[in-house]
Image (cartoon, rainbow, N blue to C red):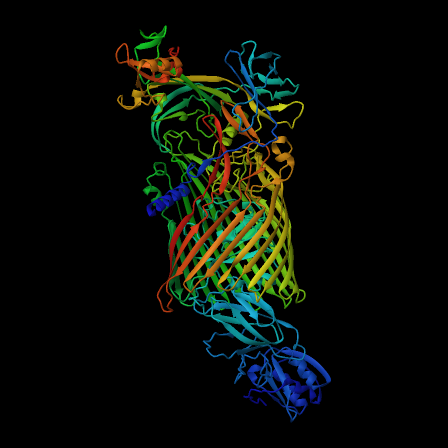
């Protein structure tokens, strides 16, 4: 009893004295109040890439809801200052693509115009394209003791911007090799009610999984002596992250931002992070560059940006930083194979959730395992990506 | 002719008038009294008997035409302390002071008094009259006679003032109750030991009351204004619990509304958190003073922002009086003497902040005896020493406090805490030197430093440094003055050391130097003037950043120095209109001018304004008073913060062309009553405040290292009102207080564009709007050695801004906010208990010790400090933080030697 108590006290003092962001913080349930008016949310990013440009239109939703409602059947158009009009059409609910491919051009001013199905009209402020310098390198760096975390950081070094202060927003796409925890060479199928062993036809052991960035990453060269980004951590993979158990690749996209856009994304980021439990940034309405034409007081969320994009891809392998014999955590866990007799095996194999793994003798009994433990296509694609470069 | 008179006459004065006397004509110019008397002797048969030393040397002029000698004598003696008495033979005896009864009527001073076998008439010359303390063990009451009796002054009131000092140390005794028995007259000595009373002519039983000093009781027979300085022996063996005795009658007597005083001696037994006795924490148990929450630095007084308090330590501004984000106050509890908090009427001598003044005084060092105090607690230790330098003249007080939290952190097993740091220390030294009977010098130095890290790649540090030099002089019984020089400095720095090429050091600092002259003049019994002048120079380094190491790409940047001069002139009159009505009227003219560097995007500007400080007290009954006040104030310096609560890296900015000074107005009205011979004090006070140009900031403003700060600032108006109730029990084994206040604090920010408007430009609750605030502080003394204290707090939850809902943007969920402060975190309540055990207290023991065992938050209430929303892995989660969610026991050991 006594030692328990003193431990609690020590822990507590630690919590107080370290100003740790986690120790004294707990999640709570929160619900939106009854009278909730949904507001329009626009995410439009026009780039210098020649493609069908995309504008997403959704609405705000209640705290307890999981998904945003889409704004369907809106009329969307982007105009520029030399009289071009690019009409957009809805390809999926809330997703509007330009009917023709086009690319933003340096020096022109673009404006987004939206008319929703109920006749409300919205517009963005006229926006010029913000440039983006080339990315010199994205390099994996082994980091030890970064806030008590060990792992590999993907660090970006940029080239100098020719236009002085530069502001960027980053997105990344990670693609990494995954391997099924269990390898098998045969499949067990049911033919006329009988269990039959055949040679494996599909690649189920080595696959590639792709994930998209979720957090806002921005950078500015404002307080740097040279107008280039250096040492910006784009992604941090902690030791034991299955993403880097074999080979890992990241494509970093750098979008140029104007100062207003940078401020918008920076505030967006600040409002969604907590810096310290002792002081909290004053939250308030984050105004973007979109407004309602009919009612200036109406809240419109989101941002319309016109950006030049530069990209860079990087690769690394597990063995670049870790001992080849070190534990490589699998993406799928746990995996336990079980020995079953024929009847039960047939039912489990037919159900789809379990797969055959190994035949003790060709006629059974068989070892059965969770499907994702032997079939990596359930977690990724077995097609080697075009850009993939092996070690 | 010069006949010596060596007898003390014991006659009744009234017999004089019956005598028919001769008439005389005479004229004289620039003659001494003795020469005039000789002139009368020449012209009449009268002979005068007197002691030559009694006669003043001042020359006099006059002319009398066939006037009775009696009239002539009345006239020429009117300016002296002498009385005259016609003897049977027609000759005249001059006596000093009065003639008193040889024996007093037995019930004159109450039945318990024995008639004195012998009266002692003090014959020192007026006005300076010092009664040295004598170890009077008898029950006799000494009599002190001030002035002389005449027909004209046998009724009416006279002022008696003086200074009370400790005989052992020579230090002034502040907050000592001075009362007159059975007359409902009383006052309290000020910080420098001065008191002033108005006594009815004749006999008064004058008493000082305190458990900290020996009893002093004298019979004062007063016939003119006079001065009585007293030396008392401090009673160091007192073992009482919370002592509120010092405030006797102050509650109802003073003209000020909204003034609270905390004496460190009073708070000795209040429950501690992490073993620290904290004078400012106690302040927050008083109605009208609060903090935004546990772990929030800064105080909110009557709905004002944390930057609207003038917090001064020995006259110098202390910018951040907090360690560990407000967990501990930066004031050493052993060296702090008292704090006066002005939350309603702010006397004219103070200015520069809208809401309140916290006037914190370091106690004087002993000039007689070496001594010290030490404490050992779970997080901090403290050692304070009293070192007499020149015995009886000067002493040095040195106090130091430090924490060993870093050591605790390093010994923890928790991996994530290993690389963190949090530590602080503060040192204070005060030197006081009595130059002569009329003047003294005080010098204080203070330094505090905090260091902490939130993430392992950055270390934050901040320091307070201040120095004061004060010269006090007592010119005469009517004039007193202080010349004060102060310098304060506050700064923080951030060291960033990562594994990449962007290491930097950045920082901010503010420095102010002030010269101030405060004068006091007592014109007569009715008027007392305070006047003075002050001027303050600000030097601000608004921000700099420099790279660390040759590899670092961080560009050095330095925002140009900001300078400003704030000056003020003030005059106030404390005017006793009648016995019942006391008015305190003051005017202060403050003036600010920016002297900023060129190249700043915002220009310099000058502002000035007249500030009225009016307050009045009216006795409805002898122990029931009504007080009202009106105040207006200007503030030329602002904090820049876009946090919801105060933080150590808040910046201070001077007014400029685009950032106008803040202005505030307050009216308050209160009723004050003492019951049961001042055992209970009750006060009810209400107030209404308005403020203009209070600062707010655009959403997402970057304030640090921003050389165009003016573009981020929104200026709005504020409104606050409330009622405060305080009931104190000041004596007995059970004592303490109960405070309740209902306070509202509202803001309005109505800019030109929708983004610059908060809540549609309507009034909304400020971050510190906590309407209900209840505090209870109680002490119970079981025996001389054991006492128990409890502290209970209840407050309405603080308003916070919560999202209206969510939206999907940039690959993740985000929350959006609209109306500010429409939600409240759950109500706050907390109970603390503490047990004090005094070491045994034999009188001649070398050291005196006590143990304090406290439990903070006995109920284990998980009081939320804030609610916030984070996006993690693309999803929004609501989070709640709390600082002390479990009971926190602490034990500390204190030693006084």
* Residue in the foreground of this view, choosing between B432 and A20: A20
* Residue in the foreground of this view, choosing between B824 and B505: B824
User: Where does residue A78 sit, x and y in percent of width and height?
Assistant: 59, 15
Please count the marks in the image: 0
User: Where does residue B865 sit, x and y in percent of width and height?
Assistant: 49, 41
Q: Furthest residue to the front?
A: A343
Q: Furthest residue to the top?
A: A192
Quick check: B752 left or right of B445?
A: right
Residue B9 visible in the displayed image? yes
User: Where does residue B260 sit, x and y in percent of width and height?
Assistant: 55, 56
* Residue in the foreground of this view, choosing between A158 and B407: B407
User: Where does residue B602 sit, x and y in percent of width and height?
Assistant: 57, 36
Corner quadrant of residue B248: bottom right
* Residue in the foreground of this view, choosing between B103 and B730: B730
Q: Is residue B501 above or below residue B862?
A: above
Residue at 47% x, 46% y is: B326
Quick check: B625 left or right of B261?
A: right
Q: Quadrant of the C terminus of chain B?
A: bottom left
Q: Is residue B337 above or below residue B143?
A: above
Q: Quadrant of the N terminus of chain B?
A: bottom right
């Amino acid at each position: 009893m006594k030692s328990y108590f003193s431990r609690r006290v020590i822990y507590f003092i630690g919590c107080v004295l370290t100003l740790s962001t986690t120790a004294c913080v707990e999640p709570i349930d929160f619900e939106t109040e009854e009278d909730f008016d949904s507001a329009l949310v626009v995410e439009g990013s026009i780039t210098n890439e020649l493609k069908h440009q995309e504008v997403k239109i959704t609405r705000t939703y209640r705290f307890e809801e999981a998904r945003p409602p889409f704004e369907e059947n809106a009329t969307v158009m982007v105009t520029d200052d030399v009289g071009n009009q690019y009409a957009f059409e809805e390809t999926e609910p809330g997703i509007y693509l330009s009917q023709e491919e086009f690319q933003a051009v340096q020096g022109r001013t673009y404006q987004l115009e939206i008319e929703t199905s109920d006749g409300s009209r919205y517009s963005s402020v006229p926006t010029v394209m913000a440039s983006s310098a080339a990315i010199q390198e994205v390099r994996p760096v082994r980091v030890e003791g970064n806030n008590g975390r060990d792992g590999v950081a993907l660090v970006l070094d940029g080239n100098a911007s020719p236009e002085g202060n530069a502001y960027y927003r980053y997105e990344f796409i990670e693609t990494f090799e995954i391997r099924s925890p269990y390898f098998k060479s045969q499949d067990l199928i049911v033919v006329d009610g009988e269990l039959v062993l055949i040679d494996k036809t599909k690649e189920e052991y080595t696959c590639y999984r792709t994930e998209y960035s979720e957090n806002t990453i921005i950078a500015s060269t404002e307080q740097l002596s040279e107008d280039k980004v250096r040492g910006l951590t784009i992604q941090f993979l902690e030791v034991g992250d299955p993403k880097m158990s074999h080979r890992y690749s990241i494509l970093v996209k750098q979008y140029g931002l104007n100062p207003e856009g940078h401020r918008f994304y920076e505030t967006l980021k600040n409002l969604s992070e907590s810096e310290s439990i002792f002081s909290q940034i004053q939250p308030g309405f984050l105004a973007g560059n979109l407004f309602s034409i009919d009612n200036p007081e109406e809240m419109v969320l989101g941002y319309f940006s016109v950006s030049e994009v530069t990209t860079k891809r990087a690769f690394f392998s597990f063995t670049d930083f870790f001992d080849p014999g070190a534990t490589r955590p699998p993406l799928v866990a746990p995996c336990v194979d079980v020995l079953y007799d024929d009847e039960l095996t047939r039912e489990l194999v037919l159900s789809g959730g379990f797969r055959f793994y190994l035949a003790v003798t060709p006629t059974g009994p068989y070892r059965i395992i969770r499907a994702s433990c032997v079939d990596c296509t359930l977690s990724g694609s077995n097609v080697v990506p075009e850009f993939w470069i092996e070690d | 002719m010069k006949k010596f008179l060596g007898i003390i006459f014991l006659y009744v004065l009234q017999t004089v008038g019956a005598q028919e006397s001769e008439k005389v004509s005479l004229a004289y110019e620039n003659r001494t009294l003795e020469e005039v008397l000789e002139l009368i002797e020449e012209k009449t048969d009268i002979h005068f008997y007197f002691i030559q030393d009694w006669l003043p040397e001042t020359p006099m002029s006059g002319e009398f035409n066939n006037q009775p000698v009696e009239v002539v004598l009345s006239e020429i003696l009117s300016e002296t302390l002498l009385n005259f008495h016609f003897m049977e033979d027609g000759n005249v005896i001059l006596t000093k002071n009065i003639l008193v009864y040889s024996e007093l009527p037995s019930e004159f001073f109450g039945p318990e008094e024995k008639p004195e076998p012998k009266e002692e008439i003090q014959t020192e010359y007026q006005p300076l009259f010092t009664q040295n303390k004598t170890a009077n063990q008898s029950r006799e009451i000494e009599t002190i006679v001030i002035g002389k009796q005449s027909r004209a002054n046998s009724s009416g009131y006279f002022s008696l003032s003086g200074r009370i000092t400790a005989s052992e140390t020579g230090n002034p005794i502040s907050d000592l109750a001075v009362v007159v028995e059975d007359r409902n007259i009383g006052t309290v000595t000020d910080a420098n030991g001065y008191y002033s009373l108005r006594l009815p002519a004749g006999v008064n039983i004058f008493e000082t009351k305190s458990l900290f000093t020996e009893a002093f009781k004298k019979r004062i027979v007063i016939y003119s204004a006079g001065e009585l300085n007293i030396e008392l022996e401090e009673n160091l063996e007192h073992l009482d619990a919370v002592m509120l005795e010092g405030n006797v009658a102050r509650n109802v007597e003073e003209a000020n509304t909204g003034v609270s005083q905390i004496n460190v001696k009073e708070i000795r037994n209040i429950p501690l958190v992490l073993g620290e006795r904290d004078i400012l924490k106690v302040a927050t148990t008083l109605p009208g003073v609060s903090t935004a929450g546990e772990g929030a630095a800064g105080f909110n007084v009557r709905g004002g922002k944390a930057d609207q308090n003038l917090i001064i330590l020995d006259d110098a501004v202390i910018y951040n009086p907090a360690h560990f984000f407000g967990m501990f106050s930066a004031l050493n509890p052993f060296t702090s003497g008292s704090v006066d908090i002005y939350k309603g009427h702010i006397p004219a001598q103070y200015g520069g902040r809208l809401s309140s003044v916290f006037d914190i005084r370091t106690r004087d060092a002993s000039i007689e005896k070496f001594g010290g105090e030490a404490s050992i607690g779970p997080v901090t230790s403290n050692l304070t020493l009293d070192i007499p330098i020149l015995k009886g003249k000067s002493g040095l007080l040195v106090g130091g406090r430090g924490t060993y939290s870093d050591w605790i952190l390093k010994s923890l097993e928790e991996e994530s805490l290993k690389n963190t740091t949090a530590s602080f220390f503060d040192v204070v030294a005060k030197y006081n030197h009595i130059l002569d009977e009329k003047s003294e010098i005080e010098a204080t130095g203070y330094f505090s430093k905090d260091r902490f890290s939130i993430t392992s790649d950055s270390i934050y540090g901040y320091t307070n440094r201040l120095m004061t030099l004060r010269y006090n002089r007592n010119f005469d019984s009517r004039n007193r003055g202080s010349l004060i020089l102060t310098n304060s400095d506050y700064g923080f720095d951030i060291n960033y050391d990562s594994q990449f090429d962007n290491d930097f050091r950045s920082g901010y600092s503010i420095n102010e130097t002030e010269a101030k002259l405060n004068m006091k003049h007592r014109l007569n019994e009715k008027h007392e003037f305070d006047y003075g002048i002050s001027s303050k120079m600000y030097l601000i380094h608004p921000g700099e950043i420099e790279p660390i190491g040759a590899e670092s790409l961080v560009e050095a940047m330095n925002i140009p120095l900001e300078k400003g001069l704030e000056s003020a002139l003030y005059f106030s009159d404390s005017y006793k209109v009648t016995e019942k009505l006391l008015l305190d009227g003051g005017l202060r003219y403050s003036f600010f001018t920016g002297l900023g560097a060129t190249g700043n995007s915002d220009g310099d500007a000058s502002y000035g304004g007249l500030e009225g400080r009016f307050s009045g007290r009216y006795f409805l009954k002898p122990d029931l008073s009504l007080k009202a006040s009106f105040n207006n104030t200007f503030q030329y310096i602002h904090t820049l913060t876009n946090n919801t609560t105060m933080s150590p890296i808040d910046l201070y900015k001077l007014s400029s062309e685009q950032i106008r000074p803040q202005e505030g107005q307050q009216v308050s009205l209160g009723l004050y009553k003492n019951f049961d011979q001042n055992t209970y004090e009750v006060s009810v006070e209400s107030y209404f405040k308005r403020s203009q140009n209070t600062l707010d900031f655009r959403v997402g403003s970057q304030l640090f290292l921003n050389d165009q700060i003016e573009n981020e600032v929104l200026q709005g108006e504020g409104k606050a009102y409330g009622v405060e109730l305080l009931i104190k029990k000041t004596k007995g084994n059970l004592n303490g207080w109960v405070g309740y206040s209902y306070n509202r604090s509202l803001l309005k920010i109505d800019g030109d564009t929708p983004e610059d408007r908060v809540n549609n430009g309507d009034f909304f609750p400020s971050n510190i709007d906590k309407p209900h605030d209840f505090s209870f502080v109680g002490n119970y003394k079981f025996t001389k050695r054991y006492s128990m204290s409890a502290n209970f707090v209840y407050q309405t939850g603080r308003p916070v801004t919560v999202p209206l809902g969510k939206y999907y943007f940039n690959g993740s969920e985000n929350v959006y906010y609209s109306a500010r402060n429409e939600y409240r975190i759950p109500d706050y309540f907390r109970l603390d208990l503490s047990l004090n055990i005094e070491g045994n207290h034999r009188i001649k023991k070398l050291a005196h010790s006590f143990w304090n065992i406290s439990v903070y938050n006995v109920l284990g209430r998980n009081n939320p400090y804030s609610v916030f929303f984070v996006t993690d892995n693309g999803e929004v989660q609501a989070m709640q933080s709390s600082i002390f969610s479990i009971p926190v026991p602490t034990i500390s050991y204190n030693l006084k030697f």
